[in-house]
Amino acid sequence: MIFEDLPTAPTAEELVDQAFSRAARAGRAKSGVEAQRSMLMTASNVLHDNLQNTVAAWPDFREVDEFYTELADAVLRRSLDDVREGETGLDAIKQDLAEVSWAARKNKELGREYIGRIPNDSEGARKVRKQAFARMADVTEDVADNLAAIGAARDALKVLPDIRPDEPTVVVAGYPNVGKTSFINRVTNANNEIASYPFTTTGLQIGHFERERIRYQIVDTPGLLDRPAAERNEIEDQAVSAMVHLADAVLFFLDPSGTCGYPLEAQLALRDELEARFDAPLVTVANKSDLSTDVEADIYISVEKGENVDAALDLGVDATGYEPELPFEG
């Protein structure tokens, strides 16, 4: 997952302390004017490199799949309210990264500028070096809030579930208690992942299965695709938009028996809403066929009885229309 390996962002205070400590060690290895030159360039290089490395660790969002950019934006809008005022989404973090990149360049420029000012006497060189250190510390402190926001963003994004937009994906939707989780458990590997998810009180369920040596992922999103849009807040609705980019097919589960606790009319209304929202094909799966088949559906199954379960999954696979890219044969 693209955010999993993001390093912890340093604070401005940590960066300054590290740079000046390294500079002091470098200065002890020399004497006179050369000691001051060495200290100045060491501090400049350490600040530049650490600030720039903080920026370089983040992906180029122009190359990130739309699923993850939408999801990241939703996560950051929710998670950064306590860190900063105003804009809290992905654009804000991009600006934070730009500010830190500016500070990196500025510290490098200050190193070069003040090296040119160092006189040939030790006391004068020490004064210039101290002036340079003060300027570098000020520049780094100027981006303290940006570094704090980047650190908070990293903490929020690194726990996102490992969903792979490049794999064909079947998204499972429908009201609670219609059999979605039981279905996924039956058709996928035993080690399905229950991942944390920033918008729900329950875990996102991600499973995998293979057809003709192609790995598919199947995703259930409790708290997102199990209620009407009118009951979702703005951030949850944006997360649904991310799922729109992810899904290659949607299996929508109905419970015509009504034992799930939701009227069939409401279930059908949710299905129609999601069918209009998603670009991917939607397959209607009527579960609990041992209790009722009193609804029009693409397939009738009973997860509990094990009836037509694999056939329903096959419909989802067919709906994705996925064809692997084959090497050129000429």
Image (cartoon, grey):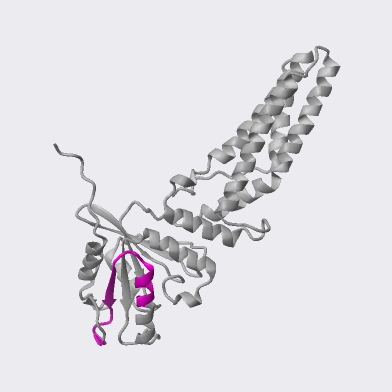
Which residue is painted at 59% across and 36% down in the image? 52
Q: Is residue 123 left or right of residue 207?
A: right
Towards the viewer: 159 or 150: 150
Q: Is residue 110 left or right of residue 193?
A: right
Say which quarter of the image contains residue 41. Answer: top right
- Please tell me whether residue 72 is drawn above or below residue 17 in the rendered image: below
Q: Is residue 293 magenta?
A: yes
- Please tell me whether residue 31 is drawn above or below residue 197 in the rendered image: above
Which residue is painted at 36% across and 71% down in the image? 276
Residue 140 horizontal/vertical position (percent): 71, 38
Q: Quadrant of the C terminus?
A: top left
Which residue is painted at 49% across and 43% down in the image? 60
Over which residues does the magenta segment extend? 271-294
Residue 157 horizontal/vertical position (percent): 52, 54
Towards the viewer: 2 or 191: 2
Among all residues in the image, which is located at the extreme left? 330
